[in-house]
Image (cartoon, rainbow, N blue to C red):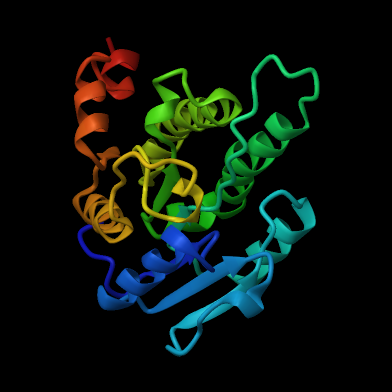
Amino acid sequence: MTSLAGQTVLVTGANRGMGREYVTQLLDRGVTKIYAAARDPQTIDAEDPRVVPLQLDVTDARSVAEAGRTASDVSVLINNAGIAHAASVLDPDTSKLRAELETNLFGPLATASTFADRIAEKSGAIVNVASILAWVPVGASYGVSKAAVAYATDSMRLELGPRGVQVLGVYVGLVDTDMGKFSDAPKSDPADVVRQVLDGIESGADEVLADESTRSLRAKLGKPIRERANA
């Protein structure tokens, strides 16, 4: 995809943090329409007529199916919604891990499968937000969910690439949003991360490595999955 101008984009988790920043920058890039999705669409800032609030709970199959019917003209899907508990992987109560997997993994898989055919018809793009914690085992249950997202993203790319769909994985450390408030460590500016992701869509990239720590670690991991799969 050479330009986001004229595209119809669906952003999950669009009511705060990174999601809100995606909406702002997509409008600046001239998209035709943004389905700004959240569990409560009343939390969406819809002053611009191109922003269409959309009720969507990515963990609810009926909600995803209804969104698929409503947003049938989507050409770009940005799977931004996510939660973080970072519970111990040895905790006998797996409810927090299961909740992270439902939102962070099965949610993007559900939306991608719902919109894949329509996006393929438009030679569009799907963006999945992983994390540097997919590669570093310090994120406990959250890291488990993001490692699964990373693997699913690579698999999705191999399946959808031949159909003309760009599948972009986003890898970043801490970002200065509500989800990053637990740590005093340096954080990336959400606006900078989103700018890199949108640039990545327009350049046809497979991955966006949004900070120096992520780029440094990625260089130590060897070849990208596309090259490894074809080896």
Q: Residue at x 54, y 80 (%)?
A: 52
Q: Residue at x 50, y 31 (%)?
A: 146
Pick the residue in front: 100 or 175.
Answer: 175
Quarter of the image where the N terminus is located:
bottom left
Q: Quadrant of residue 66?
A: bottom right
Q: Is residue 45 visible?
A: yes
The residue lying furthest to the front in this view is 184
Relative to 154, say whether 176 is above or below: below
Left or right: where does residue 174 sit relative to residue 227?
Answer: right
Pick the residue in front: 65 or 210.
Answer: 210
Quarter of the image where the C terminus is located:
top left
Pick the residue in front: 25 or 225.
Answer: 25
Left or right: where does residue 109 sit relative to residue 26?
Answer: right
How many badges with numbers are in the image?
Answer: 0
Q: Residue at x 30, y 23 (%)?
A: 226
Relative to 173, say whether 19 is above or below: below
Relative to 29, say whether 98 is above or below: above
The residue lying furthest to the top in this view is 231
| x and y, in percent, of residue 70 in the image | 64, 72
| x and y, in percent, of residue 11 in the image | 49, 62
| x and y, in percent, of residue 184 in the image | 38, 42
Q: Is residue 72 visible?
A: no
Pick the residue in front: 219 or 9.
Answer: 219
| x and y, in percent, of residue 77 in the image | 46, 56
Q: Residue at x 19, y 35 (%)?
A: 212
Left or right: where does residue 186 sit relative to residue 47?
Answer: left
Q: Quadrant of residue 34?
A: bottom left
